[in-house]
Image: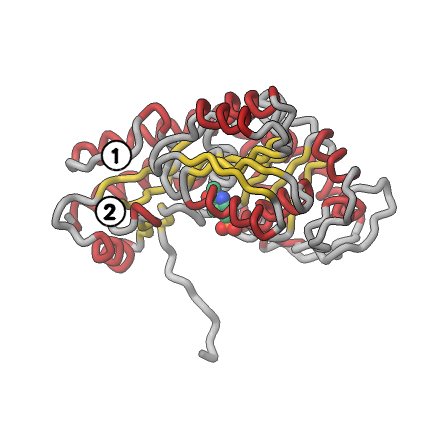
Amino acid sequence: MNTSFHPTPRTLMGPGPSDVHPRVLGAMAKATIGHLDPEFIGLMEEIKVLMRQTFRTQNKLTLPLSAPGSAAMEASFANLLEPGDKVIVCINGVFGMRMAENVRRMGGELVTVEDEWGTPVDAEKLSAALAANPETKIVAMVHAETSTGVCSDVKTLCALAKKHNCLTIVDSVTGLAGVPLEVDAWQVDVAYSGTQKCLSAPPGISLITFSEAAAECVRARNAPVQSWFLDVSLLMAYWEGEGARTYHHTAPVNAMYGLHEALLMVQEQGLEQSWQKHRDMHASLAENLTGLGLDFVVHSDCRLPQLNLVKVPEGVDEASVRKQLLTDFNLEIGAGLGAFAGKVWRIGLMGYSARQENIQLCTSALRACL
Ligand SMILES: *Cc1c(COP(=O)(O)O)cnc(C)c1O
């Protein structure tokens, strides 16, 4: 108890956090400076530019939040939604359910479009829901459903929502830098992500961007955003403002060093190359696991390369295998959630975890445990 904490180094191949790149950890160990120091303000400016490049957007209102992905989800709804507004939430896993819960708690009128776990959001169902609910204000969806390993067709779903003049909210916490996301080209109004999935940084920070239409919606609110901390109009006075910045909260300075380094590394590699890397590593893992006789849950058409759901073979206790992987191999993989609990493993290949050496370790360790 009275000694420093020394975690055992692990290989993180679960649903997040994923392995943190040594360059990011190194950046975070740099000297802390004041959050209103001109050098830190310069860093904030660079972070916003890097974020726009990574989200593929020109959105002015693009900023990190000093809180994890779930806070960005909450911020999306808190800023756009006013009590009584009708919101369609597409649900095909845990995170869609969490979005729906946000809408309920904020007094929105919730309409759900539900698809089976392990399948993508069905555009036909969304289309029918939009036709049946013409006064819908917002359509929300999860790009990369981490609970099921499914990628939904955000481009098509947002185009449908736009035809009905709705604002769109897209959760790309697991998607960003792992699979293509084109915020502007796909007409996404609010997109958010997190640091600990495909960006190879530690958990705790989220990234969010608002289109001009979404920003206008915030400006046109009747009542102020109920959450003081997540009100983007207040946050922007801190993250923007030429020269004069008003204190809002103390930014987690070293965590921002980490985010900056992580985004810089994505740009150095190239976003397309990052998407391709995830596809390549997935192909390599899939070949190995198929060789071990393991089956994938999600159809290859809509499978996320960075999050692989694998069926637990008949007669195998999934929890004891995970325990053995951790204790004997220092390897973490994820358990199934909800309908998939006890039936699947979730093997992440996100960001710095998407490496050949991780794939070899995972393959040989699973071979030994099975
Ligand atoms: C991880 C995740 C979140 C939540 O992020 P936290 O940083 O854990 O709060 C939200 N949505 C999806 C799809 C995720 O994978």
Q: Secondary structure at mark 2?
A: loop
Name the residue rendered at 69%, 30% in the picture: 211
* Number of callouts: 2
Q: Which mark is residue 343?
A: 2
- Does ligand 1 reach within 8 Å of label 2's beta carbon? no
Residue pushed farthest right?
Answer: 244
Q: Position of residue 120 (x, y in %)?
A: 40, 30
Side (left or right) of 297 relative to 142: left
Can residue 23 be seen?
A: no
Side (left or right) of 25 relative to 117: right
Mark 1 vs mark 2, foreground winner is 2
Going by the numbered disc 1, the residue's amino acid type is Phe
Residue 62 sits above or below residue 34 on the image: above
Going by the numbered disc 2, the residue's amino acid type is Lys
Q: Position of residue 32 (x, y in %)?
A: 68, 57
Q: Label 2: few (<14), some or many (≥20) within 10 Å?
A: many
Q: Position of residue 184 (x, y in %)?
A: 63, 24
Would you name the residue on which mark 1 appears? Answer: 296
Name the residue rendered at 15%, 50% in the picture: 316
Residue nearest the observer in this picture, 152 or 99? 99
